[in-house]
Amino acid sequence: MPDLDDYIEAIEAGGKRMLSYGITSTMDAAVGMSNGWTEFAAYEAAKATGRLPVRVSMCLIGDKERNILEEATEKGYVAGSGDDMLRVRQVKIFIDGSIGGKTAAMKTPYEGAEDNHGLFCLTQDETDALVKRAHDLGYQMAVHAIGDAAIERILNAFRAAQEANPAPDRRHRIEHCGWLSHEQIATMVELGALPAPQPDFIYYFGDQYVEVRGKEASDFAYPMRTWIDAGLRPSASTDCPVTPLNPFAGLYAMVTRTTDRGTVLGADQALTMEEALNAYTLESAYASHEEEIKGRLVPGQLADIAVFSQDLFEIAPSAILDTTCEMTLLGGKVVFQK
């Protein structure tokens, strides 16, 4: 098991690699999942010793079997604790698995497996209780839910928590949020819930989706255009290390809806480059309640800037994948130069 020093070294190395792609902010999607409080302590130690290269939003694991939320509460941490470099913000729980593994919880069965609807990690009662606990403590939820049955379960929990203790601008998030119905999208709008997808899934896993769910269903996977038209504000990110850290695959997927094998999935869900960049910047800041301090190139916001090798508004979509980061600034200071 890695010790504290190992984690600090990894945080520094990983952060530097992010800077090489122009990434200046990240969410660690499950702090404490592998080694409990040691992971939380490592972030604080990395920041205190100048070894935290990027701004980090810490999403605490708060699941049924792995949970550091209670320890954080006992130690006096509250939602929003920290500063612009390191902040405690979200709580993570897992509702289901993955599409590729045929474990995402679906209302309809997988192709060629009529008895397989995926699996749930939590019952509805367990989901309700975990969400209510974090919600009542003031945290924003960042819940892993990919299949429509899992999304239904977490929306039920969001509704119950909000009805018991209204917090209209909490912005509870559904991480991935890949396979859902128009009715569920309407419910998300009603509840103020946010989709937090990884568009590069279309690029890396799209052909696998067709194999296990069929082409028609896959065309509506991660429906960025429909979300935006409904008034939702989807963010964009990778799911590193499930997918590579490179953000350009995500930009390419948002603009073209094309897999790495050339299959087009739901061309009607494609975004403009402006919308794709907005999802990766302003909407990502909005998704972590930080849109007032970052996400735009305007006076008064943090000068976190990525300089790319090509003008993404001028090049052909196929050239997006060949783009590299030439320089990165964090708070106005050059922190990476190719």
Image: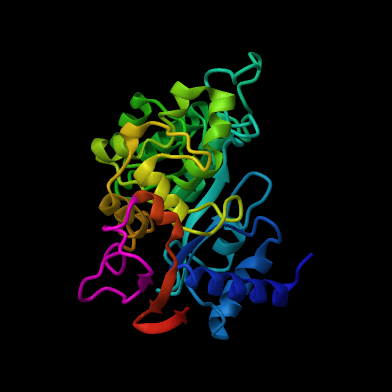
Residue 218, above or below 177: above
Residue located farthest toward the left when viewing the structure as drawn:
299
Residue 242 visible in this rendered orientation of the protein: yes
Residue located farthest toward the top when viewing the structure as drawn:
114
Where is residue 264, by image quadrant? Answer: top left
Residue 31, above or below 266: below
Question: Where residue 287 sits: x, y (%)?
Answer: 37, 54
Camera-side residue: 78 or 145? 145
Residue 156, above or below 11: above
Residue located farthest toward the right when viewing the structure as drawn:
1
Question: Where residue 129 sits: x, y (%)?
Answer: 54, 39
Camera-side residue: 224 or 310? 310
Quadrant into which the N terminus falls: bottom right
Side (left or right) of 138 relative to 147: left
Question: Where residue 192 sits: x, y (%)?
Answer: 31, 42
Please name the predominant secondary structure of the magenta segment in the image. Answer: loop
> Who's the residue at 35% across and 36% down the image?
163
> Who's the residue at 68% across and 61% down the image?
36
Camera-side residue: 142 or 314? 314
Where is residue 32, by image quadrant? Answer: bottom right
Magenta includes 228? Answer: no
> Who's the residue at 43% across and 32% down the image?
265
Q: What stretch is highlighted in magenta?
A: 291-316
Camera-side residue: 287 or 224? 224
> Who's the residue at 51% across and 26% down the image?
149
Where is residue 283, by image quadrant? Answer: bottom left
